[in-house]
Image (cartoon, rainbow, N blue to C red):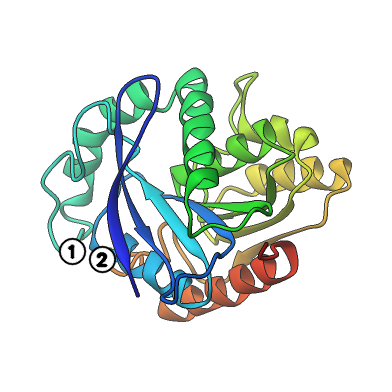
Amino acid sequence: MPTKTLQIPTPDGPADAFAAFPDGGERHPGVLLYPDAFGVRPVLKEMAGELADHGYYVLVPNLYYRHGPAPVIPLPEHIGEEIRPAVIAQLMPLLKAHITEHRVRRDADAYLAFLATRPEVGAGPVAVIGYCIGAALALRTAAAHPDQVAAVAGFHPGFVVTDTPDSPHRLVPELTAQVHLGLSDDLPSAAISELSRALDAAGLGHTAETYPGTVHGFTMADTDAFDSSALQRHWDRLLSLLGRSLTNS
């Protein structure tokens, strides 16, 4: 399986990114994968590679490229609960600086435009998926590009229901994509209700389900939150969504 480290042109300078895609020189449906708050690291590259093995071109951008190439802070091989607060404390200023509505939209424009230029990517619609904060970015991207994004998925999403006017859940009426949200069991019930109401009101093809017994971060094998059975359920749901939403052109 070929992999590449790439530079994506953006209005704010080049964004480093990782791409994984199948062998053979053929064109494949494109998938934009937003990482969790910890960013691009070996476990994300492994997940991108597994998805590529199923026939997709997977692009994983560095969310913090304005600060520098990934990893933007030193990360341990395993992000245990004892070190997680310190790591989050280092990342929080970067999150606040980089994940603004204006910057997210501008970056999404650049990422999708870049995908469209890749010779390995087919001409059809793409999918956008995200983990943790990446789920919120995926929803924002899909809402801003309804003509390009046919599928959107978010797993253990964070910051998708807030009290701000631009909360991602308020953008659901702008979506045309099919949606799957895999929710951790510790997500507040009020947030689940808000999400469900928004999706139902929009009349989208969607599933939003709680993965029983999980905590936030359950797909990430380099954290204490990891749940292997929930990760497999995530793959089952994600591959089903992509299989019925994307075509190769």
**Which amino acid type is marked by label 1?**
His
**Which amino acid type is marked by label 2?**
Asp
Is 163 located above or below residue 247 in the figure? above
For this rendering, which residue is in front, 16 or 216? 16
Q: Gap between marks 1 and 2, in whole Å?
A: 5 Å
Q: Secondary structure at mark 2?
A: loop
For this rendering, which residue is in front, 160 or 130? 130
Q: Which mark is residue 222?
A: 2
In the image, residue 216 lies at what x, y percent? Answer: 44, 56
For this rendering, which residue is in front, 61 or 21? 21
- State whether residue 135 appears in this view: no
Q: Which mark is residue 78?
A: 1
Residue under the point 82% across and 56% down: 205
Q: Residues within 10 Å of mark 1 (few under 14, many from 20)?
A: few
Q: Quadrant of the N terminus?
A: bottom left
Q: Quadrant of the C terminus?
A: bottom right
Residue under the point 34% across and 30% down: 95
| Image marks 1 and 2: residues in contact by CB distance under 8 Å | yes
Earlier in the chain: of badge 1 and badge 2, it is 1
